[in-house]
Amino acid sequence: MTKTANIDWDNLGFDYIKTDLRYISTWKDGKWDEGKLVEDNNLTISEASTALHYGQQCFEGLKAYRRKDGKIQLFRPDQNSKRLNRSCNRLLMPEIPEDKFIDACIQVVKANSEYVPPYGTGGTLYLRPFIIGTGDNIGVKPAPEYIFCVFCVPVGPYFKGGVTPVNFLVSDYDRAAPFGTGAAKVGGNYAASLYPHKVASEEGFADCIYLDPMTHTKIEEVGSANFFGITKDNKFVTPKSPSILASITRISLMNIASMYLGMEVEERDVYIDKLDEFKEAGACGTAAVITPIGGIKYKDNLHVFYSETEVGPVTKKLYDTLCGIQFGDVEAPEGWIVEVE
Ligand SMILES: *Cc1c(COP(=O)(O)O)cnc(C)c1O
């Protein structure tokens, strides 16, 4: 029997739970220290930290999965490492070497393995790596010091009782500027999204859809997830734009659509007034995996795709294949899985 923490696995949501240990490494005098696991979940930083004033911070999100044989695995952590470093470069923060990043994730999972939900509950251990600018500084410039931390939280399946579609509202607001930080996973983009999200949810929608900031004619993001559509002739289509955050779930689905389901894949403009070309649509990201899009409200019209209450067959197949790979039930393409223990 695998040892597990005293948690009601069937009622886990997406809420903070303090786990036993987190990894911390600090950057000072031009280099990262060795890094270590600590018990304290509070950080003590200078009141003048750039992360607090100028938004110099970025983060990642990935999951550890418990397999049927009890072992634990990570899904494509090398991709999170590469993306974190792209975000760091955009905000002039020091990169984390890929082996250090993956080692930190593995250490955190091993140290908190009791919190990895049992296979079959649909739950996972969500890892949150992040980097913040710290140290004493008041002018607008890169911080003199940085903290890299990875902590983890057990989370439940996003959909309890089956994958079900939700509706989205096209927002009048933008989440990112054309040559801004839309392609970097930075907190500032999220701060800017809180208000449009509130507007959408007050109108009864799950979240909002952001259009391209330059022309407001093309779909960019669905809340904090990427968009995909399945055309009537069965192509997997997803938007292409420099201000989209390149989702790892999305590139994985592009591969799955072509390699496992034999579909054609297109990365191109998706016009908000041409939604008729799709028979199904969805939003994808690590937290929700795939959220089927029931309908999209644009101006005064609600465009319904497959159904407002049932997931479409292609979306379901993509979802099952991806989850199968992540939980170790379906053979993964080479290099996608890192076994922890
Ligand atoms: C993290 C994120 C996603 C999803 O990326 P995954 O790598 O699939 O988790 C999509 N959009 C935004 C804005 C994000 O921050």
Image: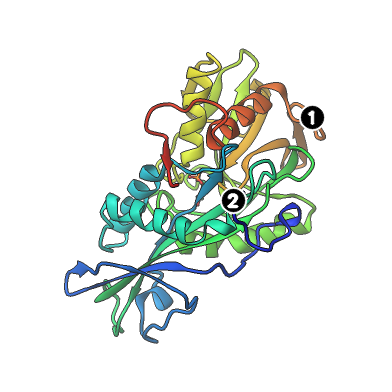
Residue 289's place in the image compared with 155, above or below, is: above
Residue 181: x percent and y percent? 40, 55
Residue 217: x percent and y percent? 56, 38
Q: What amino acid type is highlighted by mark number 1?
A: Ser
Which residue is the extreme one toward the front? 1
- Residue matched to label 1: 307
Q: Quadrant of residue 170?
A: top right
Q: What amino acid type is highlighted by mark number 2?
A: Thr
Residue 203: x percent and y percent? 78, 54
Q: What residue sits 46% from the left and 25% below the top?
A: 255
Locate residue 27 relative to residue 58 in the image: left or right.
left
Mark 2–mark 1 distance (CA, rounded to whole Å) = 41 Å
Judging depth in this view, the residue of 194 and 22 nearest the camera is: 22
Q: Quadrant of residue 35?
A: bottom left
Residue 249's place in the image compared with 184, above or below, is: above
Judging depth in this view, the residue of 26 and 191 nearest the camera is: 26
Locate residue 34 relative to residue 227 in the image: left or right.
left
Residue 68: x percent and y percent? 60, 37
Locate residue 246 relative to residue 17 in the image: left or right.
left
Helix, strand, or loop for circle 2? loop
- Nearer the viewer's eye, disc 2 or disc 1? 2
Check residue 6 in the rendering and tell me which mark sits there, or answer none. Answer: none
- Residue matched to label 2: 2
Using the rendered image of the protein, determine whether residue 322 is visible from the camera's viewpoint: yes
Judging depth in this view, the residue of 302 and 22 nearest the camera is: 22
Locate residue 291 relative to residue 132 in the image: left or right.
right
First in sequence: mark 2 vs mark 1: 2
Residue 73's place in the image compared with 87, above or below, is: above
Q: What residue sits 28% from the left and 64% below the top?
A: 93
Q: What residue sits 40% from the left and 45% below the top?
A: 77
